[in-house]
Amino acid sequence: MHIPGPSQLDRDDWNIYLSITVFFLICLAPIMFPGHYLYDDVGRSIEGYYDWTANGRPFSDLIYFVLMRGSATHDIAPLPQLLSVLSIGAAALFLRRAFREESTLNVFLLGSMVFAVPTYLENFSYNYDSFSYTISALLALAAACVGVNGWKLVLSATLLLLSLLTYQAAINVYFVASLGLFAFYSVEHNSTRYTFILRKTAVAAVCLVFYLATSFFYPYGNYEKQHNGLVSLSHPVAGILRNIREGFSQLYSTLALDPVLLIIVIAVIAFPVLALLAIFAGTRRRSPLEAALALLFAILAIIGVQIVLKSPVWHARTYLGLGAACTISTVISLRVCQGQVGRSFARILALGLMFCFLTTTYSLGAFLKNVRLYQQSAVPPMAAKINRVAASSHASVFAIWGQEHFPTNMQMTLKAVPILSEINNGDPIYNGWWGYKTLVQYGLNQSLIFGGKKDWSEVCRLLPAHPFSSGYEVVSNGKTVFLVFPDGCPQSIAEN
């Protein structure tokens, strides 16, 4: 497959691209405009740092350096998210040529499914990182879809290396798509399928070596140091099996929060495997069994390189391979099902997945809007009170005890759509450093040093006789000013 330029796109290409762009614009618009800051967004919006390179993502630094015209990072939302929406349609163009799919409906479904999974919504929720997450997955998908002969092999390696330098977990998309193409070639009885998968594996190995080599040219940050180590060489198998268990356990726990979504995802992935095994049982040909095994390995590739890490990160945003796995499973279903009923069932499952995505995005959009409104009304008075207590007590250190909880309307949303707690799980005031930065965003004196001695008994003894009438208390011991929430000192509630 070659990557088509704009002049090589036919009318069907443009129709598919525009249809996918409109679909995702409709789906994701509610998340683009609330202006909610998620984790790193808070720090970057206040302090103006890039710092993706310290996390092993120098190409992300370059992307945002260009978008922000070389100045300090500042909020340009929703531009990164809008660029993500405009980029997503490219997935369909790669897949159409790689899998030689002629049906525009099928290509629309396949191109959409790469990103139309609720786990992607955490990636998209970041005001700053959303575009780099999206482009890294597209680069990995393109690297898998490009051929393995001559200069195409070099192009594949270049695209994959750029993907790694943008967001490391996106390499899982490459593994999933490559295994999907091997399964497709097995179904098509393509004799070059073994050469294809061997060369794709070699490309991944070379890129990982080059990626590790680039790390000598920039310093690692604390986050990267914490998570980039490999499993113990003395017990590698035990470490890998532990990671597989934990990775799929977390993925299952996330999807199980939406039982309908879980059933659809399992059906999408299991349907082609069962169909291939049925063909193998009836014909005893080796190729259907090869394709089924490739799809099973593609499921494992959803967590991909994380299985060899000492301390892998299991968040919704790290499962970028899930959408790719659903896509290649649907490709094989459409190819191996001989009757119209089987192909229609595959399309219905794809539409069901997209419907779950659509409804979840609107729930998340309303939720983020309410979080933002609550922060704008409740956090400035909180920050002002902390400043007053710190000034009157001459405290120079600030600490947060306990966790603020969502107001009732937001609690109802989380109860009705619990998967949102995994997609975007930050309370209005995060516990710890992110909470400190959120308060700074709304007026907290930045000269206060975040920290404080963790002496719970001392903090709780400082509370008034009838605490938490306003939902929180601000107290000081002369050195540290404490923002205390009810669950930080539950014994005080019991005593009063």
Image (cartoon, rainbow, N blue to C red):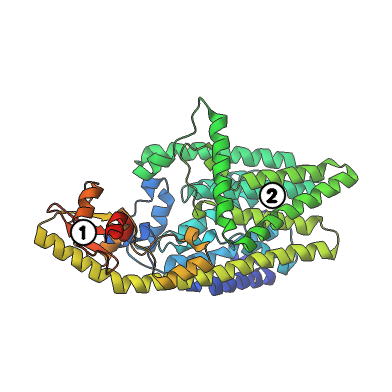
Badge number at residue 164: none
Dot 2, how many residues are within 10 Å of its Cα: few (below 14), some (14-19), or many (20+)? many
Q: Residue furthest top?
A: 234
Task: Give the side of residue 356 with respect to residue 230, left or right.
Answer: right
Relative to 401, residue 377 above or below: below
Q: Position of residue 390 (x, y in %)?
A: 14, 60
Badge number at residue 463: 1
Residue 65 visible in image? no
Q: CA distance from mark 1 to mark 2?
A: 60 Å
User: Disc 2 designates what residue?
Assistant: 180
- The amino acid on which the numbered mark 1 sits, given as a three-letter code, is Leu
Task: Give the side of residue 449 with respect to residue 86, left or right.
Answer: left
Placement of the C terminus among the 4 image quadrants: bottom left
Q: Position of residue 447 (x, y in %)?
A: 17, 57
Q: Position of residue 393 (x, y in %)?
A: 10, 58
Image marks 1 and 2: residues in contact by CB distance under 8 Å: no
Q: Which sits in the foreground, 378 or 19?
A: 378
Residue 441 visible in image? yes
Per the image, label 1 sits on a secondary structure element best described as: loop
- The amino acid on which the numbered mark 2 sits, given as a three-letter code, is Gly
Give the mark toward the camera: 1 or 2. 1
Per the image, label 2 sits on a secondary structure element best described as: helix
Task: Identify the residue shown where x is 24% and y is 67%.
Answer: 382
Q: Which sits in the foreground, 344 or 157?
A: 344
Whichever of callouts 1 and 2 sits on the residue coming sooner in the sequence is 2
